[in-house]
Amino acid sequence: MWWFRARRLQQERAAEIEACRAMLVDRYIECGLSREEALRTARLELEEPLTEQTRVEHTMRPSMRNTIESSLQDARYAGRALRKSPAFTAIAVLTLALGIGVNTAIFSVVYAVLLRPLPYNHPEQLAFIWSSFKSASSRAPTSGPALYEIQHRSRLAQDIAAIWVGTGTFTGDVNPEQVKVAFVTTNFLQMLGTRPALGRVFRPDEQFNGPPAIVLSYGLWQRRFGGDPSIVGKGVAFQGESATVLGVLPQDFQLYFPQDSNVPPEIGVFFPFQNWLYQRPRTLYFLRVLARLKPGVSVDQAQADMNQVANQMRGAYTEFANENLKLEVAPMQRDVVRDLRTPLIALFAGSGFVLLICSVNIANLLLARANDRRQEIAVRCALGASQGRILRQLFLEGLLLCALAGATGVALGWAALRGLLTIRPDYLARMPHVELNWPVLAFVAAVSLACALVFGLAPSFESAKSDLIGTLREAGRSSQTPARRGVSALLIVGEITLGFVLVIGAGLMIRTLTKIQQVNPGFDAQRLMTFELDLNKFDPPDRINFVRDWESKLATLPGVDAVGGVSHLPLDDYSNWYSPYRPEGVAQSAATTLADYRAITPGYLRAMGTRLLEGRLFDDRDRAETQQVVLVDDMLAHSAWPGESAVGKKIETEHFTQKGVIPVWAEVVGVVEHVHNHSLSKRLRAEVYIPFTQTPREHMTFAVRTRMDPSALAGTIRQELQKRDKDLALSKLRPMTTYVERASAPVRFTAVLAGIFAALALLLAAIGIYGVISYSVSRRMHEMGVRMALGATSSDVLRLVMREGLVLTSIGMLLGTVGALFVSRALEGLLYGISAVDPVSYAIAIPVIALAAVLGCWRPAAKAASANPVDALRM
Amino acid sequence: MSYSSVVLAKIQTGTPPAMPEPSEILQGTLDMLVLRTLALGPMHGLGVSDRIRQITRGVFVVKPGSLFPALYRLEQNGWIKGHWGESENNRKAKYYTLTPSGRAQLTKEKRKWNKAFSAVNRLLEGEF
């Protein structure tokens, strides 16, 4: 290696000088000098070589040494050049850092959500299997018997598991606590490749006779059981009985399921399904199915396999044939983020646009700078610098600039990410590891390097081919060449185009957000307090009595207007209850239609503010032993009895009776408006309401309509429940507005970010126009002076400059309109309540962009108009 | 070598070292002088310096500050080769020998110098 050689050489040279000194001393002594004098003279003579020249310089191969040395020289020169113009450097670095920072933050999210592999064993083999029915508008879960069929008929899946999430309550010494319980087939955890932190998980084909066995989440084990290391094998009080703890899941274990699956990421307890699962009704669809495909099986092959399975199932059972059951394979990695893909990609594209606009500004700056430095570069060429050397030097300057910007950008991005995470909607909370990690940093480095290549090389090609003699002759009076002005104009047009597209995109998202906030969800969320109770410990008659007494107690609290209870609150992520219904006169063999089912107490709809359209609401006359009655929403009424009154009609609906979950013929007593149970923007399914007395579900959510701030009631509600029953677990005590906000959070997130991007784009575009126009004006002050000397008024000059900027802006807006039309087509799936060519968005975007352009042009134009003809001519 | 045309070596001329009259001579000249001296036979640095003064009758005095870099440079180019030996008065010294490529280089330099020298002479003495 060359540095070892260098070291040896240096030692040898020192030895040689030493030898030389000795000889000199000998010689001087011979000449008659004293020893001291001889030493001093020799030292003086050798001083120079000792200090300066023994430094090793020639140790590398000359060509390589030259390259490295001259590169270092160039780098130092680049650093000096940047330091010499701090304003330019600061603006360029900050602009680019802004672009890189925005991209760093967004890419961190994109990476964490869309790109990072799921933390399971061979995640690429995992796929959901969704059912689809003729009657259902969206994909559906499956039933126990159907799961059995799929498991036994599939040939390309290694393993098929299923999950359903409900709630359960821990009782015992400490406060009762309601937790999310995942009911899973015994192979579920093992299929994911979960390694427990403690104990073990269920074994496939394991049967539990006797006390139920459960697996705890790490969080629950820490929180409720104090991280007890000997908990495995112990019995804990769960759902009113003793359950044996089999194991504890690792700390980072999380379920990643799509939003519409109603499987939340944080589960407290895993509970095994037993064989009874397969004896449940064939049409009770509630299981979310996850399969591990055999290695190397493609999605298409798996889909073909499932098509065959579905075909066999339709042949074997009339229920499946009637519903035209189909099975759909969805790879887990993609499916988990199916609702996030479009908005995130749109945002990523938006941040890319911001970076492009930043880049355009910097390209303009560098062009102007290269123009100013033509003189310097020409002189360097004249002194013998090769084109390659000059290119390299300019490239190094670009690289240095981009490296600075990249570093600043990462810092900005980190700060932006902190901000982003505070406003992130729940769906991003499902992805906890949004952070700056190596892939993100690699991305930033790649972006910075790409910028360096573009910025370093593009203007330098321009400069390097510049006309040497002409430039030298110009000597300081240089004006912009027409070609370069053309490039600047092109950049401005590009900037306006990108800015316009961003503003339109943001406009569409903001308009969608306002539309969604204006949606009447079928209830009034203001001044409404909600909370959930687990009533599992009561027998059905006691449960009915308890709820009646509890509601009348709540109604007497000060400030309370109305009280009601419901089995499934709208916009909650609690597992949905939806089942088939059959209006009278429709044959049993006909296709089933599905509706959301809700068990409610008489006061519920009034408390929620849901309007009654026809007939009556439930009241105390509707009891367990009286005629089975239901309320339906207008959606069901219109589709089942178009043009007729639904009141008094008979309908077969599913009731939870003491005999089990059975179809019952009920009478429609009223029609209410549709409630948005799942999404503010979509009407998903018709709705059926059953009196709580006739279907006493185990979990009830209570809605309390107040005359004041609903949160003020929280303490009172807790105290009242404590007084009444210490074993009841109360959860999700929060105002109804929380649910509404959460439902609109994804749209708000997209809209806020798109708005920020658009604002940045406007600002950058205005700065960009300002930069280019003012540069061009400063170069043309002479021309302006001449014009004025020849009789142009200052308003003529003002107009001239403004026109230059505004013509470019108009061209940009025209191109932007075309671009925006394409972009809004791509955004269509994210929009609600407006068309993709929303006239309002365009009507706002056009003047906003024009205003930004005018602001950008104004100062330089005014400066040009103030040109003094005398000064200009004297120049 | 790219620097050879730019970097100039300083050689002091004139007999008395006390009265320096610096003039800049292209480094190539010094290299040539060193090569020419070594063509006489192997010699150490101080010897080279002595011999140049002796042959040029004191017109050129090469100080160590110029001599050693020149030696290193020539060795780097492979024109001379150094090896340790003993000096006349039993001191350790590094002796340099001209290599075949150094001899070729010397011939080249000589030809160049003669050409330049006669050109300059013609210019100074010729008729216009």
Image: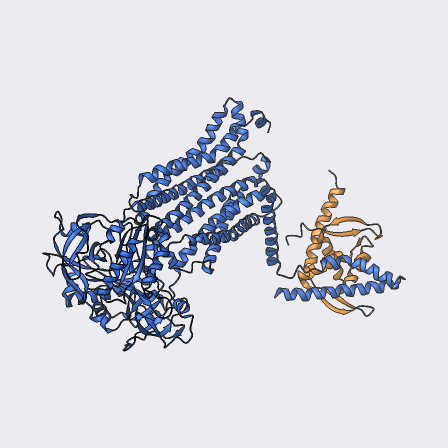
Chain colours: A blue, B orange
Which sits in the foreground, A488 or A466? A488
From the viewer's perspective, is residue A846 above or below residue A587?
Answer: above
Seen as rendered, the residue at the extreme top is A791
From the viewer's perspective, is residue A308 above or below residue A705?
Answer: below
Q: Where is residue A807 in the image (x, y as percent from the top left)?
A: 42, 33
Q: In which quarter of the image is the C terminus of chain A?
A: top right
Is residue A449 visible to us here?
no
Which sits in the foreground, A758 or A142? A142
Q: Position of residue A267 (x, y in %)?
A: 35, 65
Position of residue A497 in the picture relative to residue A617 (left or right): right
Which sits in the foreground, A674 or A134? A674
Q: Where is residue A12 in the image (x, y as percent from the top left)?
A: 71, 66
Give the residue displayed 49% in from the left and 47% down from the top.
A96
Position of residue A684 in the picture relative to residue A255 (left or right): left
Position of residue A236 in the picture relative to residue B70 (left or right): left
- Give the image quarter of residue A113: bottom left
Please count the marks in the image. Answer: 0
Is residue B91 visible to us here?
yes
